Image: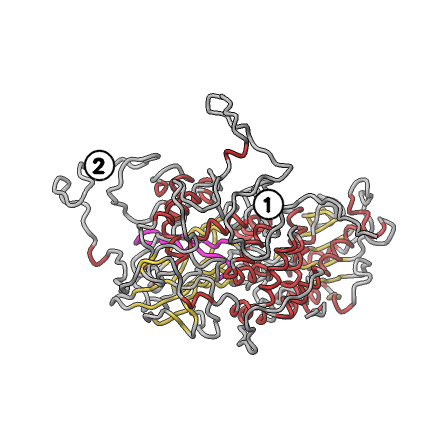
């Protein structure tokens, strides 16, 4: 009997299956899929041309410039030797990146969805001997604005997507604006900035249907990263819990690149920048993220704004890893110019040099959070760049982006972008010119304006005179950039077993969303080159055989405990505890809980059967509108019988667990069950049936003071991960 043919399933990404190996035989562009069409080919006057609708598409088998010049290499920018700086004459880098910078109008091409806040940075002086920058001297307080963001989603996407998150900080220093434009992951997908358009084109929604939004779980993303294996490092971080931040307040930040600091005597050192959150690095579970996307897509921006309004000001320690500024620019065998590599903190501890505190919400989202324009080229005396090939391209790209996004060259004059230092730049006119310039001689030298402005001399910014070795102009990278797997193995094996389980689940979910099986198989080869057990478990989940590695796997790996989020305790200020009450719950017990939690700087929210007040307490959430993902812990006080609206026709959640026939409102049971599954702290005061079926050891029970103490202890560890035995 012949095999039954597979039914047609919509969602195929292209008109033909993908090849396992990167295609190398030149061919014409593929035709559209059968369900695709395009606009008629008409002139601007409306005249028909008679040309096929595909005539407006790209033509020819070979890669060219926008002017039709054939190109041999689009993976490396032109530099002075394999380790040298970018050359301005690289027409392809400038055209490719500049065109990419202007693809989105007016939304940012990446990092479109963001949230921002004002704050202050206070230097402790620990960096003053390393760096001459004024804002790093002892006790100096510097105003800041920080913008957090997701990378892939549009402005209308949701906060809890599995994604990299931006952590961009502007220091309004007395020497001009300094922008540290970083991420919540210390490595990046690519090593050379010329590949950034390729990466984002692959990761953004697929161009035919503009789906999926704000997700990497689709064919084009995994097609790119499985072929471009240098992306495996960043991809592993994203597939870990780091890709699902609990909040911006519990998100670590990294400068990603290696920078050069210059001291008062001209001495230099290389550094990597870190932001360490005071509340620790925490994430949500995958189910929490999925629920949150529906019930509160603004969860992160809401959490940040609410915390600041409540006075639970988020804070981070600013730190540096310091390395000798040697000619090789390596440390313990790690190439410091490779942005896909990090230096384990056990090899180079992070030294705290100051503290950032966010203490003010924007007055107007558009004028501040949306119009702020970060630029890695915004440097101050004492901070210089290196030849990191990703950083070199970013120095051009960010400045170029603002010209279109903000309508011209005077975006620096928008209020949120204005420096807190005197400006005398000799730049004139242009769109949106807000200054009224005096004088007649905006040039140097001049005598008609009395010589003003004068060169700043020793106060000025000086590019470090680093020697550039004589070399051929090449499009290449150092051989030390070739290792794409060893640090990925280090990261995965440094995670706790429960975190490894989450990585396995993430890869399995993402790859299961790829339509093309070839892409899944190719990514499994990359996983085999990282860790055999990881590959086997993901392959099992996909129903595919686990391939053999194509590289030699390390037999021993020196682990980095700093990479794990499990096993420590952190401050609980700003956490949110839901207090679930019924009509007859003891008002004194509810009041005692609220007082004790508030005294620990924890936010208690009362969840009742209806709005208004119950006893002496205001009801902040109801059984109908509360969601477990809003809370870090739940405490149930007394009985919570079904409320009058506990009917599936009124609230579908009331149909959970067989409907409102038991002693507990089914929506309360749903809250409790989800919080239990997500390993959150649970407490019970008085007799309640809400925890029926939950193991006694998973609930802190007793008087209000006993429950409060127990819940706060569990909150300090973030989650009760020992509630469930890991699979790995």
Q: Which mark is residue 213?
A: 1
Q: Residue furthest right?
A: 661
Between circles 2 and 1, the one closer to the viewer is 1
Toward which corner of the image does residue 416 lie, by quadrant? top left
Magenta: predominant secondary structure element?
strand
Residue 247's x, y, as percent? Answer: 57, 55
- Looking at marks 2 and 1 on the same chain, the residue that comes earlier in the sequence is marked by 1
Q: Which mark is residue 438?
A: 2
Q: CA distance from mark 2 to mark 1?
A: 49 Å
Toward which corner of the image does residue 480 lie, by quadrant? bottom left
Vertical order, 438 against 182 (above or below): above
Residue 381's x, y, as percent? Answer: 29, 58
Give the left or right position of residue 686, taking residue 419 as reference.
Answer: right
Q: Nearer the viewer, residue 664 or 378?
A: 378
- What crowding class fits label 1: few (fewer than 14 Cα within 10 Å), some (14-19), or many (20 or more)? some
Q: Does the rendering let one see residue 253?
A: yes
Q: Which residues are magenta?
A: 166-186
């Amino acid at each position: 009997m012949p095999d039954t043919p597979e039914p047609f399933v919509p969602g195929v990404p292209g008109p033909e299956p993908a090849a396992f190996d990167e295609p190398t035989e030149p061919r014409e562009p593929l035709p559209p899929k059968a369900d695709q069409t395009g606009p008629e080919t008409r002139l601007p006057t409306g005249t028909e041309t008679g040309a096929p609708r595909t005539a407006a598409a790209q033509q020819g088998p070979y890669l060219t410039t926008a002017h039709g010049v054939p190109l041999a290499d689009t993976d490396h920018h032109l530099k002075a030797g394999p380790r040298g700086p970018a050359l301005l004459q690289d027409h392809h880098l400038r055209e490719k990146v500049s065109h990419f910078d202007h693809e989105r109008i007016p939304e940012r091409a990446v990092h479109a969805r963001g949230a921002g806040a004002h704050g202050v940075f206070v230097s402790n002086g620990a960096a003053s001997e390393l760096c001459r920058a004024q804002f790093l001297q002892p006790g100096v307080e510097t105003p800041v604005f920080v913008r957090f963001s997701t990378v892939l989603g549009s402005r209308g996407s949701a906060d809890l997507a599995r994604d990299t998150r931006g952590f961009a900080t502007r220091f309004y220093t007395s020497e001009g604006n300094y922008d540290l434009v970083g991420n919540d992951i210390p490595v990046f997908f690519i090593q050379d900035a010329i590949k950034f358009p390729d990466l984002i084109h692959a990761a953004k929604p697929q161009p035919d249907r503009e789906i999926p939004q704000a997700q990497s779980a689709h064919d084009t993303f995994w097609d790119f990263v499985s072929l471009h294996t240098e992306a495996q490092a960043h991809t592993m971080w994203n597939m870990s819990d780091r890709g699902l931040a609990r909040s911006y307040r519990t998100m670590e930040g990294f400068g990603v690149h290696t920078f050069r600091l210059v001291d008062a005597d001209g001495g230099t050192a290389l550094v990597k920048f870190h932001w360490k959150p005071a509340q620790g690095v925490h994430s949500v579970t995958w189910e929490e993220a999925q629920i949150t996307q529906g019930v509160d897509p603004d969860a992160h921006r809401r959490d940040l704004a609410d915390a600041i309004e409540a006075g639970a000001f988020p804070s981070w320690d600013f730190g540096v890893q310091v390395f000798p500024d040697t000619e090789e620019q390596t440390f313990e065998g790690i190439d410091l110019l490779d942005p896909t590599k990090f230096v384990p903190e056990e090899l180079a501890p992070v030294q705290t040099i100051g503290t950032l505190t966010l203490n003010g919400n924007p007055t107007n989202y558009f004028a501040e959070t949306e119009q702020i324009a970060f630029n890695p080229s915004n440097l101050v005396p004492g901070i210089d760049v290196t030849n990191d090939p990703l950083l070199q391209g970013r120095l051009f790209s960010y400045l170029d982006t603002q010209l279109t996004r903000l309508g011209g060259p005077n975006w620096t004059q928008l209020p949120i972008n204005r420096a807190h230092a005197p400006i005398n730049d000799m730049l004139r006119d242009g769109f949106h010119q807000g200054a009224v310039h005096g004088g007649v001689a905006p040039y140097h030298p001049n005598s008609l304006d009395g010589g003003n402005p004068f060169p700043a001399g020793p106060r000025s910014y000086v590019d470090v005179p680093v020697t550039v070795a004589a070399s051929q102009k090449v499009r290449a990278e150092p051989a030390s950039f070739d290792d794409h797997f060893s640090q990925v193995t280090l990261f995965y094996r440094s995670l706790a077993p429960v975190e490894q389980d989450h990585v396995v689940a993430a890869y399995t979910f993402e790859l299961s969303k790829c339509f093309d099986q070839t892409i899944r198989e190719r990514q499994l080869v990359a996983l085999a080159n990282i860790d055999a057990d990881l590959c086997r478990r993901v392959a099992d989940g996909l129903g595919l055989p686990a391939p053999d590695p194509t590289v030699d796997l390390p037999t021993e790996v020196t682990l980095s405990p700093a990479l794990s989020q499990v096993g420590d305790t952190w401050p609980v200020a700003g956490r949110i505890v839901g207090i679930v009450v019924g009509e007859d719950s003891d008002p004194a017990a509810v009041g005692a809980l609220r007082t004790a939690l508030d005294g620990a700087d924890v936010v208690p929210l009362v969840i009742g059967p209806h709005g208004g007040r119950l006893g002496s307490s205001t009801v902040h959430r109801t059984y109908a509108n509360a969601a477990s993902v809003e809370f870090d812990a739940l405490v149930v006080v007394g009985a919570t019988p079904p409320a009058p609206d506990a009917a599936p026709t009124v609230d579908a959640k009331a149909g959970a667990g067989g409907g409102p026939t038991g002693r507990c409102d089914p929506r309360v049971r749903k809250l409790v069950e989800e919080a239990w599954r997500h390993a959150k702290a649970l407490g019970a005061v008085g007799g309640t049936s809400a925890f029926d079926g939950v193991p006694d050891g998973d609930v802190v029970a007793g008087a209000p003071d006993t429950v409060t103490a127990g819940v706060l202890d569990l909150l300090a560890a973030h989650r009760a991960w020992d509630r469930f035995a890991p699979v790995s």
